[in-house]
Every structure is written in structure tokens, then in C-alpha cells.
Image (spheres, rainbow, N blue to C red):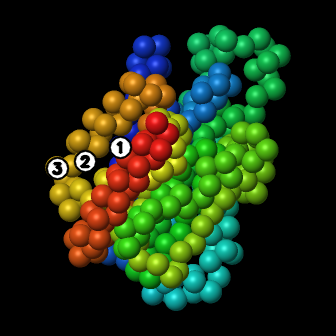
Amino acid sequence: MFSGFSSSVKGASHEIKNIVCQDSSAHFAGENYAVAVVADGHGSKKHFRSNIGSKIAVESTLATIEKFYENPEEFDSNFPKNHDMVIRNIQKQIISRWNVSVAEHFRNNPVTSQEKADFTKEEFAKIPVESYYGTTLVAVVACKEFSFGFQIGDGSLVGVFEDGSTALLIDYEESNPANITASICNANAASMFDSFYIGDKKVLALYVSTDGLYTSFGSDDDFLDYHAIITSQLSEAEAFESAVVKNLKKRSNYGTQDDISLSCIFDKELINSRLGVLKQKIKENKQRQISGKVKQN
């Protein structure tokens, strides 16, 4: 029923500075549910293991969703009635799993003299261990009768629906309240998540991406149109995925120069049945863009 793809590309600025890619991404597509997840390790110097933290965040999310879905029939039956509570529990379990894994990594990999080199002794002593691994997290889950997702920190969630419409499922600004850096490493991380639930609309595809993709577009409309166009190509996803990766690299090189991650889950059968509607919507979107440019001139 479900399919998916995911990719992370190293930002152009990181290539120039020889910095590791701090993004991570993954997806899972099974019979009963599918997950797409991305994480963006923080760039500031106190988060010097953020590339590892983002990888652990992605792994923790997949493992937590799998645990909650041990009994598919029970989960599908109970979730719609209690989705707010269950989503909060999932978020807390992800944070807990991430902290345990980070602590284990730290025990097995003590801080090196090279990692300390940019700090004074006093500066370094003030940094909590979990901050070394600080990262954002964005995830979406598709089930047979509903979908849900959540994020902490910046990044985007986009849904493409059976009528061809697209939507940002969480407003971009909402993920970073009051200019505070929302991170899974924060002590109050559980209270910093935003989430959504969809129980009344059929979804063709769901996307999560790190902020390097969103900020490479001039407007929300352009960003959403991009996802509609990708969705129209997913009937040949295996061949199209390499083209998406090339486009992500291009958007980094000529746009934000940041790392970019994109992960997607979709229903190929449903996309094929609604392909005509989707292509018509893309045509309308293109015409709208042309009309808008004419009015501006």
C-alpha cells in the first residue's frame, strides 16, 4: 500500500568548509503504516556532535513508532479517539530514547581534545552533554485511515491530497516559537513540539524536509507547487528519485547553500487513480503564477 523515499544532501557551504552533513533522513513503508522523518543538527559550535544527534533522532523516531504499532488493529482503533494524548506520548518516548542513545554514545566516545579546542575550560564546562548532539526533528506517519505528524525546531511538513491540493500541515513559523531555538536536546523539549492529525481526508503523499529546502523558495505557493509536481512523478518513483536528489543539490548550490533533507511517504495506487486531477491542479497552479507575474508587470 505505502511506498517512500528519503535523501540528505550536503550543503554547498559545508562542501567548501569541509564540514560534515549535519542532516539525517529515513523512511519506512510497511503494510499497515509508513513513516518519513528528517532531522537537522544545529550548526553552532557547542553542538559539535549534531550530525550524530540527528542520526540518533531519526533512528529513535522509527523505533518508537514501530513500538507503538506492535498491535496494528488496536492502534488503528484507539488512535483516532485519543490522538492528542498518543502523539504526546510518542514525542516523549522519542525524547527518552534519544537521550538514552546519546548518553550511551557519549560513554563510548569521550570528548576529544580536538572537540574541546574551540572552547575555554570554563565555556566547555557549562555545556550540557546532550547539547553536543542538538538537533531538530520532523516526522510524519501515514496509516490506513488517518495521518499525523510532529516537529520540534524548524523544517516543513507538506500534504498532497486526492483533490490535488497541497498544504503546509504546520505553519513554518510555529515550529520555532518566540525566536527560541527549539531542539530535542532542550530540557523542556516535550513542550516544544507542534503536531497535526488528519482523519477526514485521503492523502496522496506526505513530505517532511529540513529548513534548507523551504528557504530555497521565494514563497509558500512555489514551495507547495514543487511538492505537487514531485507527487505527479511518483508513479515512477524509482527512476524519479535520482532526479529529486540532483534537484536538492542544485537548490543548495544556488540557494541556501545549507544541507537539505527530504523524506516522503505515498500511496502509489491512489496517486495513479488521481493523476489526472493532480496534473490539472499543477496546470492551474502554473497559470496562476503566470497571471500573478503579468499583474506585477
For disc 1, the marked residue is: 7
Residue drawn at (55%, 61%) of the image: 169
Residue 246 sits in quarter: top left
Q: Nearer the viewer, mark 1 or mark 2?
A: 2
Please name the residue shown 47% across and 44% down the image. Answer: 295
Disc 3 target residue: 239
Q: Which of marks 3 and 1 is in front?
A: 3
Q: In this view, does 196 lie to the left or right of 204?
A: right
Q: Where is residue 207 in the image (x, y as percent from the top left)?
A: 43, 56
Q: Can residue 152 be seen in this view?
A: no
Residue under circle 2? 241
Amino acid residing under circle 3:
Ala
Q: What residue type is labelled 1?
A: Ser
* Contact (Cβ within 8 Å) of mark 3 with mark 2: yes
Name the residue located 24 percent from the left edge and 68 percent from the top edge.
275
Instruction: Name the one closer to the observer, 226 or 260.
Output: 226
* Residue 242 seen by the camera: yes
Q: Position of residue 160 (x, y in %)?
A: 41, 64
Above or below, 117 relative to 230: above
Using the image, determine if residue 226 lies above or below residue 44: below
